[in-house]
Image: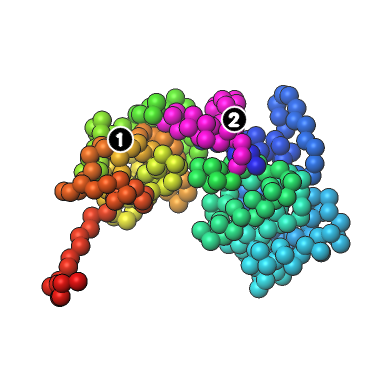
Amino acid sequence: MLGIIGRNGAGKSTLLKILSRITEPTKGRVRIKGRVASLLEVGTGFHPELTGRENIYLNGGILGMSRAETRSKFDEIVAFAEVEKFLDTPVKRYSSGMYVRLAFAIAAHLEPEILIVDEVLAVGDAEFQKKCLGKMHDVATGGRTVLFVSHNLQAVSVLCNRALFLCRGSLAYTGSVKETIELYLSTFSKTNGSDELPNRRPGSGEYRYTFASPAREYFGGAEEKTVKFEIQRHGALVGRMWLSAHIVDAAGTLVVQCDSRLAGTRVEDFERAVGEFRFTTPWLKPGSYRVDLFICAGSIVDRWEGACSLTISPVLPYLNSASEDGTKDGLVFGDFAWEIGDLIGNG
C-alpha cells in the first residue's frame, strides 16, 4: 500500500488521473500491469440517469468484469454501501455521501489488481471512513496494490508501508512512511507568510490570501493566538463570503476548525483586505501547528494549506506540575477543575 502525499498543487491528483487513463500525459508514458479501479472524484464512472443497480453493472463492465462476476459481488457491494432502499433510484438524486459510499463499494469489491483512492473519502462520515480504511487494508493484504492520496497523515502512517512525497509536479522523496511524512512536514516550517504560486492553489480564485503570519514567534498554550492576513481580489465579484481556519498538528490531525460564520462574521466584495484571526481555546499542547486558511462563498474560493505555522511554548498552562503521564494523552489541554466535597471516614 503506497501513500502519496504533498501540498496542494503538487500533482497528486494529476498523477492519479494519468494512472487511471482519465488524463493523457503531455510527454512520457506509464506502464500498468493489472486491472485498475479508481475513486478520484464523487461520481467518477457513474451515469447520472442510471440507477444504483445499473451503475454497479456498468462499473463492473468498465473494469472488465463479466455480468456473472459482478452479480456474485452484488450483495456485498450493496451491503457495504448501505443504499438498499435507493438501489433503483437514479444516482443523480443521491447525496454526495451516498455517491461516495456506492462508488467506493464498487471499486473495492470488484477485485481490481490496483485500487487508486484520492481524498474523496473525506466526503463520507467518520464511521464510513473507518470502514473504507479497513476495506483498503483488506485489499492490500490480499495481494493487491493500493495507491492512497490523503492529507490525513495518521491514516497514511497506519495503512501504508511505503510513501511518495510530491513537490511541484516532481518526485521529492520516496521511502519509508515515517521518513516521507517527516520530510513533508518539515516543508511547512519554511512557509510563514508567503506562497510563491497562489494561483495554483485550489479554489475558484476570485480572491486569494496574499499574506499570513502569526503575530508572535511563539504563544503560551492558554494564551490568545493571533494570525495576521491579507486578501486581494483577483477576479469577478462573488458577493458575501466567509473565512475559515484549520489548526493542524504535527501528525496531520485537524485539531480545530474556526469558521467565521459561527462568530457572525462575513465580508462583502472588496479590492484588498487586511485582518487577523484570533482564538484562545482549545489550549494547544507544546509544538508546531500548521494553519490552513480558506475563503468561501458557497464553494471554496481559496484554500491555502500551510499558510503559516504556530509555535506553542513548552511551558504548560497549569499552576501545578506533574509527571509526563499527567499530560501525555489527548490532542489538546483542557481548562478544567476538580471539586471534592466533605470527606467521610478515614479510609
Outermost residue, front side: 347
- 241 or 331: which is nearer to us? 331
Horizontal arrangement in the rendering, residue 295 relative to residue 324 (left or right): right
Q: Position of residue 158 (x, y in %)?
A: 55, 46
Q: Is residue 92 visible?
A: no
Contact flag, marks 2 and 1 (Cβ < 8 Å) = no
In percent of the image, x 33 and y 37: which residue is there?
287
Mark linked to residue 175:
2
The residue shown at (15%, 72%) is 346
Q: Is residue 144 visible?
A: yes
Query: SS at mark 1?
Result: strand
Q: Is residue 124 left or right of residue 246?
A: right
Q: Residues within 10 Å of mark 1 (few under 14, many from 20)?
A: many
- The colour scheme of the drawn protein is rainbow
Image point 67% across, 44% down: which residue? 146
Along the line of sight, the residue nearer the viewer: 295 or 129: 129
The amino acid type of the residue labelled 1 equals: Thr
Q: Is residue 285 magenta?
A: no
Query: Is 235 situated above or below 285?
Result: above
Looking at the image, is mark 2 or mark 1 earlier in the sequence?
2
Task: Provide the secondary structure element on which disc 2 rests.
Answer: strand
Asked whether 263 or 334 is in front, the reply is: 334
* Disc 1: which residue: 311
Q: Is residue 184 magenta?
A: yes
Highlighted magenta segment, given as a residue range: 160-188
